[in-house]
Amino acid sequence: MNPVIQREFYGILRSPKALAMLLILTIVFSVAVLMRWPSDASADLSGSQSLEVFRIFGYGLLAGVMFLVPAFPAVSIVNEKNDGTLELLLNSPLTAGAIYFGKISGVLLFSLLVLLSSLPASAACYAMGGIDFTAELGLLYFVLLLLVIQYSTLGMLVSSYAQTSDAAVRITYSAVFALFFLTLIPHAFMQGTGDWGMLKWVGDWIRYLSPLPAVMEIMGQSSVASAGLKETNSTLGFVIVTLVSSLLFAVKTLTRLNYRIFDKSRAQGVITDDRGLGTRVARRLFYIVDPQRRKAGIPWFLNPVMVKEFRCRRFGRMQWLLRLIAFCAVVSMILTSMTALGVTSWGVNSIGALLVVLQVMLVLVLTPSLASGLISGELDSGGWALLRMTPMSARQVVTGKILSVIWTLLLVLMATLPGYIMMIVIQPTMITQVQIVLICLGWTAAYVLAVSAAIGGMFRSTAVSTTMSYVLVIALFLLPMIVWLRREAPFGQDTVEAALKSNPVGAALGALQTPGFESYDLLPAAWWFAGFVTLFMLFILGIQVWRLTRPD
């Protein structure tokens, strides 16, 4: 037996967090089925009740795979490299293929336990009747097993490139989020009246990277608020694309499992201030922000911790922020311009809803990666002890760190304002709706920031804090959407409305009169809820910082 399999699998099982995850999943799946179990002796011969339970169970299992599986392969190789044990593995008699097979097998075995934890609930669904064992239940597990393989190979590939475990977790969850949601946008956008030709064919195959159309096809659901989600042959397309992408991820990772993985050679470079006068003048003309120019001193009126955060992280550096802002501005302008030119038949409201979804996805991907390591990153690297030795108070430290994230989020959100301005120009009566949407997006950013910072401050490991922040934030925004998807059965109007009030995204979509959201009264309750959660999480963060600043 490959010794790496045993080492990897047992290493995951020894973690108390892994055992807690399996127990929680088993309990949640069982309770979800028991809540809809018939209370009398009558049987539902039509099978509609069992199908409702099966859909809740299927989407819940899909969310569990999305939340839990990517974290373990994402740190598999980078932890070995940072601990100095990857050199020992490469010098052992094991080949690169055996090492990769052992590590991926250990991760897949644990992922298989995640699927097996749902068997009691799936057996109860099948016992209720109305569910085909092969075409529905078996096919669902087959699709999820392929999804586990894809996420595992993707995480291993990211882990081979990353230099730190928290960076590997951030990049992996961002990639998973993009595969799950962003791949649906090209196909959905091309459902208008325009003649897209080859682009529509490409959009169809990109859509197959997401498991959502395949799962919806297995559940027998029609399109839900997004054109083209439910189409025939989605499952077959997903199987083909997933197998091909997983193979490419695995092959690429295998090519990196050699001594060259430790190479970190970079060009030395020359600071702009050390160049000649002509070069300095030219770079001042051609660069808005010169990344090779020596930074000026910190002014007295700026929080030094905020400046330190901007200069030490990748997306804090101005040249990267400008690129991100430019990309967001161009996308928002293209979407609204295509609506004005009549390329699509969606209308301004639908394009506005798409802009909201894209902004929320950007906030969900960017904010936890920035905020979750504000405290844990310092604890993990030993920088917190240095900060405690400075004359700055704990309030200044936390304020500087939070401000660094707030300014980044504000710049990103403001980059999409041109799209909203064009919407108002196209349809001036939407100015009130746009104002409400912008307030909702502001509360969304504050909500995610507070939750990520508070949860991240509870852990000493940056990788763990990043993982937990992503899982919790995505769950807080995804679960209400799952309830909304089942708004006709089994959830009623009041239940769906209460679920949508738990985050401001539903309120923003309702303000734009997005189909499926216009019948719910979500304001101002959604703002009050977001404000309460934000203040509560900031209070928890303050208590944690106060505890960490106390004398040892």
Image (cartoon, rainbow, N blue to C red):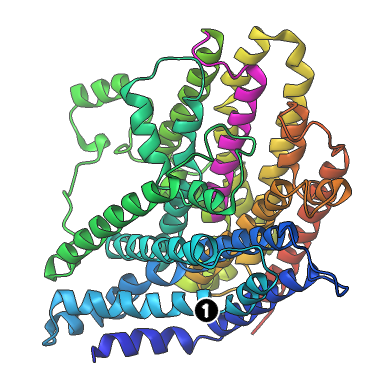
Q: Is residue 165 left or right of residue 219?
A: left
Q: Can see residue 326?
A: yes
* Picture coordinates of residue 269, whole percent (x, y): 19, 44
* Picture residue at 37% right of the left edge, 46% below the top: 237
The quarter of the displayed image where residue 253 is located:
bottom left
Quadrant including the C terminus = bottom right
Q: Residues within 10 Å of mark 1 (few under 14, many from 20)?
A: some
Q: Is residue 56 left or right of residue 192?
A: right
Who is closer to the viewer here, 264 or 32? Answer: 32
Q: Element type at marker 1?
A: helix
Q: How many marks?
A: 1
Q: Is residue 364 magenta?
A: yes
* Picture residue at 53% right of the left edge, 24% below the top: 332
Q: Is residue 13 left or right of residue 498?
A: left
* Picture coordinates of residue 242, whole percent (x, y): 35, 54
Up the image or down, 133 lies above or below 195; here it is below
* Picture residue at 79% right of the left edge, 19% below the top: 432
* Picture coordinates of residue 180, whole percent (x, y): 48, 49
User: Label 1: which residue?
Assistant: 116
* Picture coordinates of residue 284, whole percent (x, y): 31, 23
Q: Is residue 53 left or right of residue 410?
A: right
* Picture residue at 50% right of the left edge, 60% below the top: 135
* Magenta-tinted stretch: 342-368
Up the image or down, 381 lies above or below 359; here it is below
Magenta: main secondary structure equals helix
The quarter of the displayed image where residue 324 is located:
top left
Up the image or down, 97 lies above or below 294; here it is below
- Amino acid type at mark 1: Leu
- Farthest residue to the front: give it: 45
Who is closer to the viewer here, 281 or 166? Answer: 166
Q: Is residue 106 magenta?
A: no
Who is closer to the viewer here, 521 or 455? Answer: 521
